[in-house]
Image: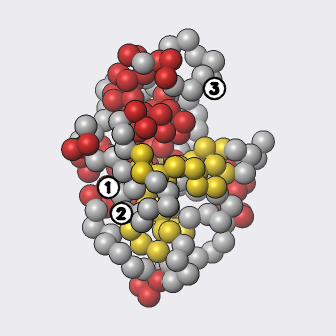
C-alpha cells in the first residue's frame, strides 16, 4: 500500500501566482482553511484520545480531515466530531465497516474520509461533480492505493484550469492544484444552514 507521505514527491510543482488565480477566495470556510497553512506543518495519522466535544490533535499536525474539521469549527462553530459521533451513535449500520468496530469511536470516526462521505450524504450535502464547483465545496478523492482523501475547493483555478484546493496530503496544510493522480469521487456543499 502506498503511504500518503510518499505521494508528495509525485506532486507537480504548480505556480499559484496572481495571474493563475480566478474566483472569489473570501468564502468563510476557505478563509478558515487558509489560516492553517504554516500552522499545521506535519501529516500525522496517529490515533489520539480526544476531548469531546471539540477535541483536536495538536495544531501542528493532522490529516486531510483535520483541515476540514478545523475550518468548520473556525468558520461556523460547527463541530463535526460531535455531529458525526451523534449520527453514528443513532445510525451506526449506515456507516462503513472498514475498521471492524462494533460501535462509534468519538476519537477517530470524524477523522475518516469514508465516514465524512457517509455523514455528508446523509445530510443531503452531496452535489454532482459535473456541476460547476463553488468555493467551500468539499472534494473527496481516492489516491493511488485507493487511499481516501478530502480537500476544500478555494473557488480558484490555475491558468490551466486545475482546481486549487486546501488540504493536507502529506506535508501539512497546503494550498495547491488538485493532484493529477487523485481520482475525484464526490463533491459536497455543506453549510450550517443546510442542517
Q: Is residue 1 left or right of residue 49?
A: right
Cα distance in 3D space between marks 1 and 3: 29 Å
Residue sitting at x 39%, y 29%: 84
Question: On residue 29, which mark appears?
Answer: 1
| Residue at the spot of label 2 | 135
| Residue at the spot of label 3 | 98
Q: Quadrant of the N terminus?
A: top right
The location of residue 131, given as percent across then percent down, is 44, 62
How packed is label 2: few (under 14 Cα within 10 Å), some, or many (20 or more)? many
N-terminal of the pair, mark 1 or mark 2, is 1
For the residue pair 135 and 169, the one nearer the viewer reads as 135
* Rendering quarter of residue 25: bottom left
For the residue pair 133 and 82, the one nearer the viewer reads as 133
Above or below: residue 60 compared with residue 80: below
Assess whether mark 2 and mark 1 are in contact (beta carbons under 8 angstroms). yes
Q: From the image, state whether disc 1 or disc 3 is nearer to you.
A: 3
Q: What is the secondary structure assignment of the residue under circle 1?
A: helix
Q: Is residue 77 left or right of residue 16?
A: left
Q: Residue furthest bottom?
A: 19
How packed is label 1: few (under 14 Cα within 10 Å), some, or many (20 or more)? many
* Rendering quarter of residue 123: top left
N-terminal of the pair, mark 3 or mark 2, is 3
Q: What is the secondary structure assignment of the residue under circle 2?
A: loop
Above or below: residue 89 compared with residue 110: above
The location of residue 64, given as percent across then percent down, is 51, 47
Residue sitting at x 42%, y 65%: 132
N-terminal of the pair, mark 1 or mark 3, is 1
Residue sitting at x 53%, y 45%: 63
Amino acid at each position: 500500500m502506498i503511504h500518503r507521505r510518499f505521494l508528495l514527491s509525485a506532486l507537480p510543482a504548480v505556480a499559484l501566482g496572481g495571474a493563475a488565480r480566478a474566483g472569489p477566495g473570501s468564502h468563510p470556510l476557505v478563509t478558515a482553511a487558509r489560516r492553517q497553512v504554516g500552522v499545521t506543518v506535519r501529516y500525522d495519522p496517529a490515533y489520539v484520545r480526544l476531548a469531546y466535544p471539540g477535541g483536536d490533535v495538536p495544531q501542528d499536525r493532522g490529516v486531510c480531515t483535520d483541515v476540514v474539521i478545523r475550518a468548520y469549527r473556525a468558520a461556523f462553530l460547527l463541530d463535526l466530531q460531535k455531529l458525526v459521533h451523534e449520527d453514528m451513535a443513532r445510525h451506526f449500520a449506515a456507516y462503513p465497516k472498514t475498521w471492524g468496530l462494533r460501535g462509534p469511536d468519538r476519537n477517530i470516526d470524524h477523522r475518516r474520509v469514508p465516514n465524512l462521505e457517509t455523514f455528508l450524504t446523509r445530510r443531503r450535502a452531496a452535489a454532482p461533480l459535473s456541476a460547476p464547483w463553488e468555493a467551500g465545496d468539499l472534494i473527496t478523492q481516492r489516491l493511488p492505493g485507493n487511499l481516501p482523501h478530502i480537500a476544500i475547493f478555494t473557488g480558484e483555478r490555475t491558468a490551466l484550469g486545475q482546481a486549487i484546493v486546501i488540504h493536507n496530503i502529506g506535508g501539512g496544510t497546503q494550498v495547491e492544484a488538485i493532484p493529477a493522480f487523485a481520482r475525484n469521487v464526490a463533491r459536497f456543499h455543506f453549510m450550517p444552514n443546510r442542517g
